[in-house]
Image: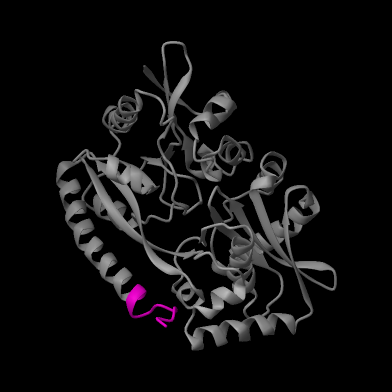
């Protein structure tokens, strides 16, 4: 076995890469990651320099991989380490560039080390990839390597003590085999149920037609409208427009069957939309935008319509992105997310480890408090 670094996913065989994405996760698919690069949403110019790790056997076949980037900043990651960077640089160090295994602009848990579980050498391949992270950091005098939004399996398997495990918090909705949206509502506390019904009635009073669009129903005209919404929402939040319009055109060509776009029309004009990706058992909410100011429209498109789709299609989980305590009132529960971090400087690594231990205790308290005292579900 040997390791290689590639700076363009276009130089990698699509079939070989996807054969390792055994969970069929939309965000670790070749088409999603390659579309980010071809559209120049991800590039050295945007501070994301692809450095994907490949493991090949003696026949030259890819038997292990990891999506990986040399980062010049910490934007678009959603696992926040800006305070670490400031502390390290205030002490005279250079935090950037750093190494990052993650899906750009996508706060969703998924595989970061791609290996066929049937491969008898999968443990050796796993160790080789983890060692490769450390070697890249050490040989290039980088400050650190990070693996974000890792699965429970990877979190448990990564037993190397040099890696600092970190906990975070997200809100997910779970399908308890509901028959319908009303069945789901019946499990909520009366006050929450009434509030959701009131919000949904408000949508009906605005002459909106809501459609769930996927597959062949998607076209460039719809994407042109959605991109305008995306930019409008970014402007309101003072953020950065990470994704280019060509990215949306590309995913429309290559993975439209894994996309659910929920749109709202008013007078036959598309005025708002919410972008979701369909996984094997999870619906991933990603971007949303609107050119109209209608109360509760965000909740309708991003949460209630997504929940309806999940119930109708027997999807077990809806992940609606980062942050948002308002999701609790709408049936979401708090859950732990994980990341792992290798820091070369031993003194700084010790300080970060101490911080993470305290932070993890606070995260655990928050999750317990939210899911017990703040739960929207009725105990009856």
Is residue 112 at least partly visible in the picture? yes
Q: Position of residue 62 (x, y in %)?
A: 47, 22
Quarter of the figure that contains the N terminus: top left
| Residue 217 position (above or below residue 28) | below
Q: Which of 41/308 is in front?
A: 308
The segment highlighted magenta reads 370-380
151 displayed left or right of 26: left
254 displayed left or right of 106: right
Q: Is residue 371 magenta?
A: yes
Q: Which of 223/210 is in front?
A: 210
| Residue 14 position (above or below residue 56) | below
Q: Main secondary structure of the magenta part?
A: loop
254 displayed left or right of 356: right
Rendered residue at 49%/80% (across/down): 188
Q: Is residue 367 magenta?
A: no
Rendered residue at 43%/81% (across/down): 378
| Residue 3 position (above or below residue 201) | above
Quarter of the figure that contains the C terminus: bottom left
Rendered residue at 55%/78% (across/down): 185
Q: Position of residue 315 (x, y in %)?
A: 56, 57
Is residue 8 at least partly visible in the picture? no
Q: Position of residue 285 (x, y in %)?
A: 56, 59
| Residue 13 position (above or below residue 317) | above
Residue pushed farthest right? Answer: 268
């Amino acid at each position: 076995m040997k390791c290689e670094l590639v700076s363009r996913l276009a130089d990698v065989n699509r079939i070989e890469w996807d054969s390792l994405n055994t969970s069929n996760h939309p965000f670790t698919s070749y088409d999603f990651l390659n579309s980010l690069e071809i559209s120049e949403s991800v590039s050295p110019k945007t501070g994301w320099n692809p450095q994907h790790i490949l493991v090949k056997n003696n026949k030259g076949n890819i038997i292990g991989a990891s999506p990986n980037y040399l980062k010049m900043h910490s934007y678009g990651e959603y696992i926040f380490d800006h305070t670490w960077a400031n502390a390290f640089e205030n002490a005279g160090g250079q935090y950037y560039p750093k190494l990052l295994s993650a899906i750009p602009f996508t706060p969703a848990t998924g595989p970061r080390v791609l290996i066929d579980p049937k491969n008898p050498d999968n443990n050796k391949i796993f160790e080789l990839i983890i060692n490769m992270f450390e070697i890249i950091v050490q040989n290039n005098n980088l400050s650190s390597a990070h693996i974000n939004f890792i699965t429970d399996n990877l979190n448990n398997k990564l037993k190397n003590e040099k890696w600092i495990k970190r906990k975070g918090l997200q809100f997910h909705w779970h399908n308890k085999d509901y028959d319908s949206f009303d069945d789901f509502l019946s499990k909520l506390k009366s006050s929450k149920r009434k509030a959701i019904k009131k919000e949904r009635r408000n949508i009906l009073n605005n002459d909106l037609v809501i459609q769930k669009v996927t597959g062949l129903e998607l076209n460039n005209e719809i994407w042109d409208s959605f991109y305008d919404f995306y930019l409008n929402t970014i402007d309101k939040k003072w953020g950065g427009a990470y994704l280019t319009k060509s990215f949306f055109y590309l995913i429309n060509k290559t993975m439209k069957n894994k996309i659910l776009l929920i749109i709202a029309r008013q007078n036959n004009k598309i005025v708002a939309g919410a972008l979701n990706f369909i996984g094997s058992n999870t619906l991933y909410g990603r971007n949303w935008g609107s050119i109209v100011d209608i109360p509760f429209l965000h909740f309708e498109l991003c949460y209630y319509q997504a929940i309806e789709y999940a119930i109708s299609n027997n999807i077990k989980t809806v992940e609606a992105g980062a942050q948002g305590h308002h999701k609790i009132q709408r049936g979401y529960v708090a859950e732990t997310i994980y990341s792992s971090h290798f820091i070369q400087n031993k003194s700084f690594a010790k300080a970060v480890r101490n911080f993470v231990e305290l932070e993890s205790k606070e995260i655990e308290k928050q999750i317990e408090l939210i899911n017990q005292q703040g739960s929207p579900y009725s105990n009856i």
